[in-house]
Image (cartoon, grey):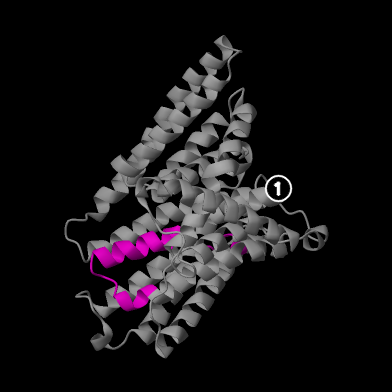
Amino acid sequence: MDSYNFLFDLALILLTTKVLGLANKRFQLPQVVGALMAGVIFGPTVLNLLNETEFITQLSEIGVIVLMFCAGLETDVDELKKSGKSSFIIALIGMIVPLIFGTIVAYFFNNDPSISDVSASIVLQNIFIGVILTATSVSITVETLKEMGKLNTNVGNTILGAAIIDDILGIVALTIVTSFADPNINVWVVLFKIFAFFIFAAICCFIFYRFFSNVQLRHDKGMRRFVILSFVYCLILSYCAEVFFGVADITGAFIAGLIISKTKYSKYIATRFEIISYMLLSPVFFASIGIKFKLPSMTPSIIIFSILLVIVAILTKIIGCGFAAKLCKFSSLESLQIGTGMISRGEVALIVANKGAALGIMSSIFFGPIIIMIIVTTVVTPLLLKIVFSDRNNRHAPKIESTV
């Protein structure tokens, strides 16, 4: 009978995420926060009714792929092109600032060799903490902006582009740091694979676009086949990105969505994916993030470090990305919105932290503070986005386009 527990888990996730989502909506809060809290409350951290299983993990992975695929479908490619240079500058500065200040905070806390349980040098551990803070979990921001109807805007496109580029830069930073601990990792090989992926993706997108457009011209009935073909392309490009090139699968999914957004029946395809995402995949994905959070025992010094880490994690993204946005001629309010949209670390930081632990370059004592940082940044991002995108703020905001 245990083999059917996934049915109960799924029913509980769908029910609790919706109930808490509606409760948040009643208080004019983003529903995604309710889905995150459902995972925390009913997961191992509180009630222990839900646990991380292979079924939930794999379904949540499909969930984030579909979420980013839908984001690509709904993105205005022309607007994204306009914000391309701005997105790169924002992503770059938004990575450097957390890296520097995260390393500094870790340095003041991790200056005693006796507290380390790994063989890597303290300097390398400190830098790795900074690398963790560079991560941005775009999925939380995307869902929140979609809920508020702000995704396909100048600011929304800039955040989306910056977060995608941030993932690429994060891979580079992670590779450089881990290469010092693992002699099998070659930085130049990784950089070449990232570059090769975008060449590969461009060729695949050109071929698929021509093929898909011809199919749509010849068959104007039975449009469900277009949905299936789109999903197949999304999954294959996601698979190739992750397995062959070491690039995040969500990057492949987003690019697939961008290409299909330029085809004839893109709106029809988007509505079909919205249904399965809303009904099943997104609730499982966001609940799974909460389920993953398992707080270890905390000492007073760890608690102090956790508080500092949270403050640095939030402020460095707001200040770093916000300052970069100002350099790109965004208004003060738009800069604040962009910086806020880049705060969430989510599952991305957790993956990076696990990678460091596996390679022996991060002490286990850091897991508690990192998990707290992930929880706080994941939950506060939708709340802060709601505030900075409020009608009262936007009513007085000047309409300034990026000129970079």
Magenta extent: 339-367
Dominant secondary structure of the magenta stretch?
helix
Kindly tell me whether residue 385 is visible in this rendering.
yes
Q: Quadrant of residue 144?
A: bottom right
Residue at the spot 55% in from the left edge and 71% down from the top edge: 314
Pick out the residue farthest to the left: 183
Q: Is residue 207 above or below residue 366?
A: above
Q: Is residue 141 above or below residue 181?
A: above
Q: Quadrant of residue 171?
A: bottom left
Image location (x, y in percent) of residue 127: 34, 72
Q: Is residue 357 left or right of residue 208?
A: left
User: Which residue is disc 1 drawn over?
Assistant: 149
Image location (x, y in percent) of residue 347: 44, 59
Image location (x, y in percent) of residue 380: 60, 67
Q: Nearer the viewer, residue 170 or 295?
A: 295
Residue at the spot 26% in from the left edge and 70% down from the top edge: 361
